[in-house]
Image (cartoon, rainbow, N blue to C red):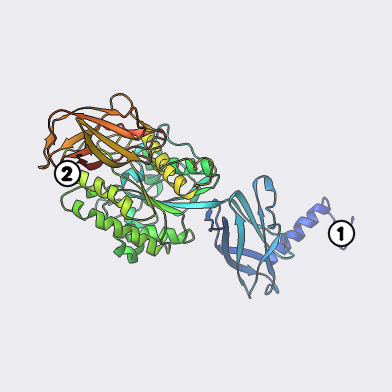
Amino acid sequence: MCECPEFPLLQCGQMTGCRLALVILIAAVSHAQELRVSSGVVNSQVFQRGPDGMATIRLSGTATGKKINGHEVLARLQGPGGVPVAKFDWKPLAQVQKTRWDGDLSGIPVGGPYRLDLRLQDSPAVVSFTDLLVGDLWILAGQSNMEGLGDLVDAQSPSPLVHSFDMADRWVLAEEPLHTLVNATDAVHWPPNSDQVPEKWTGQKLDQYLANRRKGAGPGLPFAVEMAKRTEVPIGLLPCAHDGTSLEQWDPALKNVGGDSLYGSMLRRFRATGGRVRGVLWYQGESDANPKAAPLFEERFRKFVQAIRADFNEPKLPFYYVQIGRTANPANPQHWNAVQLAQLRSESEIPYVGMAAAVDLTLDDAIHVDTQDLKRVGIRLSNLACHDLFPRKQNCVSLKRGPHPESATLTGNIIRVTFSGVNGRLLAEGRLAGFSLQGPDDAPLAMLYKARLDPADPNGVLLYIQGNLPMDTRVWYGQGKDPYCNLHDEADMAAPVFMLPVQKP
């Protein structure tokens, strides 16, 4: 017989030591009092910080046990290395009301990964959640080039500061491919089966698909990794894109059908992750480049952005998008350009938006940007967000939004095209290409024989012509559906597709 110093009234009897008695007692207490968390946090979750840089985790759950009413729920937050975060070492969170409890853990600073521990007072049993981050959430939406159909070869490497709320509603480390539609929670993303009924893939069929997948790289992860690196603010991504979709299919009027519509699915996922995000990344428009949809695109796009801001309760929500680039499909070139010009106009007409160009990028097939240039798209989007949202950060303070056409002026036999927003100076590898002239009857003018960067102006391009320029001549950059364009600046921000009237002296 021996006595246990931790509990002197207990005797060990035939047990091997006093520690076993302690373990049994702890197990008994744990069994008598049990704490459960029903909402507010899961492993790997990213929480959107507020304007003060802090986040609040709203927790609720239940507790069971004798005389549990009125007991306190305690919380502890630990940072990397298991070090408790200042002011978060076992602090009161809530009181149990009968069997339920809820409370807010406020003032959590940007950073992580954090470990959150919860327990009842006087109980050694701890409920833990790990790999939590506080930072910024971004929605990824649009069609295939945002979904990502780049080869999964030399794709963007993950970062421990970037997590994803995958399409099956699980918080995970963000890795390519971010979008997996076939097992999404929402039926709008499911592929049709042999009876043309949407069907969610599970079991062996899903496992085989995932094991054999060779496509799926997109711009979202490169954006997030670059943002986290520059700003030291963790990122949470909400993939919502779906290939081949038009703006009409993203109709906000269908939000009430929830996961049976693209907009409803996006809105549901927004609410499921806390109802606050830092912004939206959008890459779409290819499916609207046709005679029916192109004339409606600009107005639909404006209303779409307005609807998101209204439904997200954030009138100044940042919204960054990509101007559609090239395609090898020769049909409807005028409508392709019409969508591109509508996207360019929208940047100056809709507040708190930014547009990245893609007309200079390499394709993997007739319409999809390849993996390495999707990385460039992601970084271009990060440049816009960095410029607008982090103007005091060292890696953002000197950034401009990239080349934007301002004027085209004829002097002698030279048209001078000037740009604003240039980082450093304009650049072009090899012979500068992408410019053309169009007459008043929309016919091409075969008068342009040379284009070069202006040696006297880092923001200018010189176009050399022969003959007399007709009235109402227009300068195009990127006209058609498959132009070769190579104008960008020192930050690799590309010139967009544009059309300018030529001004004569």
Quarter occupied by the C terminus: top left
Kindly identify which residue carries mark 2.
334
> Residue 234: percent from the left, percent from the top?
53, 47
Identify which amino acid the numbered label 2 is placed on: Gln
Say which of 314 and 202 sits in front: 314
How far apart are labels 1 and 2 at the CA level?
90 Å
Kindly identify which residue carries mark 1.
11
Quarter of the figure with residue 96: bottom right
Say which of 423 and 165 sits in front: 423
> Residue 317: percent from the left, percent from the top?
42, 57
Which of the numbered marks, if any, corresponds to residue 213? none
Q: Which residue is depicted at the point 25% across and 57% down?
A: 299
Tally of marks: 2
Q: Is residue 501 left or right of residue 178?
A: left
Q: Which residue is depicted at the point 75% across and 58% down?
A: 24
- Say what secondary structure mark 2 lies in: helix
